[in-house]
Amino acid sequence: MAEGLEGVVAAHTILSDVDGVGGHLVIRGYELDQLAERIRFAEAAHLLLDGFFEDLPDIGELDVQLGQARVEAFEYANVVNAIPPGLNAVEAVRALIARIPDGDNLKIALLLLAGVSVFTAAVARARRGMPLISPDPSLDHATDILRMMKGVAPTPEEAAALDTYLVTVCDHGLNASTFAARVTASTLAGLNSAVLTGISTLKGPLHGGAPGPVIEMLDEIGDASNARTWIEQAIDRGDRLMGFGHRIYRVRDPRADALKKAVRILGPHSGRLAHAEAVEAAALEILRERKPDRSLQTNVEFYTALLLEALGFDPDEFTCVFAMGRSLGWIAHAREQVANGRLIRPASIYIGPVPQIAA
Ligand code: SDX
């Protein structure tokens, strides 16, 4: 049996391909570097959803409908201050998503896509004791998200950096949360159920819950001269270094440099960048020394952490921002699963006790 289904093909997809040996990510026929920094999130939505909704409009109209969906989603955020304080950011966003009705049409798809973003901004403002800011449907998606988060219009560089991030993480083959979303979709449970499965799976620290702990690691290491000692002690404890290693990539994750470039464009955070680069170099060296038979490289989460911190999100909110982008992939894969797939129901080998034959 392949532990963790490693190497098992569970679907044919036209959505994305992850080449772990060559270090390439292809989304609907485009290499990542033809998309990141070049297209907006709404254009990525049009690219991924093309062919999966008969009523998908052209990109101009999709921008309008996504703006309207943000306005409609905001209505569901009206209970954000009643969310139990014990829930972390991604659990609070999940609770708000659960208020959206299930369904399998474009309206629900856009409401979910808008909802993850609107709810993240609402949860972030509520946790800071600040009044919610309603969407401006006339703005581009990334611009409006940052405006709802910060209360002021973002700079063009900030909006471009968030667009780059959302496009870069929107889809990535059959990762754990996308596979989980496909399992849910395969029972015809509906798009909301698939997104709720996706965000619940994404939040784990081995998956989309990793970027927050990257910041904690950088802060705990402090001066880069402490990096080797801190990292060696972590490896000796059997800890996983957050932001490193990948089930598929045996070379550097192509998304790492796309996001590192976006951090550079944001400018004033270059101090954190230099520190992170020094820690990254130490981590890669020690992983080579300690795990010589396993190619452990920098993954998407390492520079995600710096980018989202530079955009003003708390580490606890990073997974919500990941979900803002990846919810597009979950929805596209859910539609592909319903269109082409069967109920996903693998086999298992029973190794439990054998029933005692009644005397
Ligand atoms: C994402 O699948 C996707 O596409 C995911 C993703 C996406 O876009 O959806 O790319 C997003 O989830 C990126 C990964 C984010 N997670 C982290 O950064 C957490 C730290 N990384 C590890 O937990 C780990 O690398 C995984 C979970 C990402 C992958 O682990 P695998 O493939 O299951 O490998 P493994 O756990 O079986 O480890 C194999 C060996 C082990 O050594 P031994 O115990 O055999 O001696 O490699 C070691 C591990 O100890 N190892 C690490 C390590 N990752 C693997 N050791 C230290 N630090 C690490 N990060």
Image: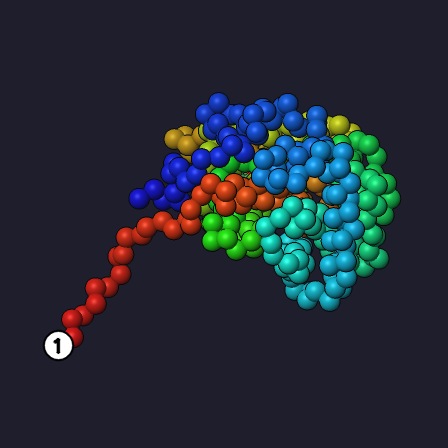
Residue toward you, 132 or 295 = 132
- 261 vs 64, nearest the viewer: 64
- Residue occupied by mark 1: 359
In front of the other: 181 or 258: 181
Residue depicted at x 55% and y 51%: 194
Q: Amino acid at mark 1?
A: Ala
Above/below status of 79 relative to 140: below
- Quarter of image, res 42: top right
Q: In the figure, 48 relative to 331: above or below?
A: above
Picture coordinates of residue 128, whole percent (x, y): 79, 56
Q: How is the image coloured?
A: rainbow
Which x, y percent locates residue 224? 64, 34
Q: Give the residue at x 77% y 44%.
A: 67
Q: Is mark 1 within 8 Å of ligand 1?
A: no
Quarter of the image where one finds residue 21: top left
Q: Position of residue 118 (x, y in %)?
A: 74, 50
Say if residue 174 shows up in the picture: yes
Residue, far right: 152
Instruction: Tell whether 2 sits left or right of 108.
Output: left
